[in-house]
Amino acid sequence: MAGCSKKTYLTENLAVDALLEARIRFVQNTSVAVYQCEDCGSWHLTSRGNMHPRLAKAMETGEIKKQSQAYFWEKKLGY
């Protein structure tokens, strides 16, 4: 298996966790899903396709916005 230049995750769950974290920390992030790479076998984030159900639920409930605001203030206040 060839290595990828993209950020890789060993499992789908780790990739989904990273997807949520990316949307929390980086407001401009457009990733919506994860996929298993045919080249390296690892998981990557993507801005293509349908939104992952966990991300959709976190956005619908306002959890992403809430966590994003908390992250902003933690960073601003130096926590």
Image (cartoon, helix red, strand yellow):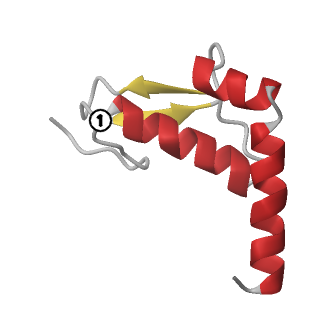
Residue found at x 76% / y 39%: 63
The quarter of the picture where the N terminus appears is: top left
The residue type indicated by label 1 comes to Ser
Query: Residue 38, how many percent across, how many down?
Result: 29, 23
Q: Quadrant of residue 31?
A: top right
User: Is the residue marked by circle 1 packed among few (<14), some (14-19), or many (20+) residues within 10 Å?
Assistant: many
* Left-right relation of 14 to 53: left
Instruction: Identify the residue at the far top of this view.
Output: 50
Could one spot residue 27 in this view of the protein?
A: no
**Depth check: 21 or 42 in front?**
21
Instruction: Using residue 63 as the reference point, say whether residue 22 is left or right of it.
Output: left
Looking at the image, which residue is at 81% across and 66% down? 72
**Which residue is depicted at the point 75% across and 52% down?**
67
Q: Viewed as shown, does residue 65 lie left or right of 19? A: right
Residue on which the image places disc 1: 42
Picture quadrant where residue 46 is located: top right
Relative to 49, does residue 35 appear above or below in the rendering?
Answer: below
The structure residue drawn at horizontal position 60% and vertical position 49%, both measured from the top left corner, is 21
Q: Quadrant of residue 20?
A: top right
In the rendering, at what x and y percent does residue 41 appear?
Answer: 24, 30
Q: Secondary structure at mark 1?
A: loop
Q: Is residue 9 above or below residue 51?
A: below
Q: Residue furthest left?
A: 1
Q: Looking at the image, can residue 9 be seen?
A: yes
Q: Position of residue 22 (x, y in %)?
A: 63, 49
Q: Kindly give the residue lying farthest to the bottom in the view shown.
A: 78
Q: Vertical placement of 2 versus 12: above or below?
A: below
Q: Position of residue 54 (x, y in %)?
A: 60, 25
Q: Quadrant of the C terminus?
A: bottom right
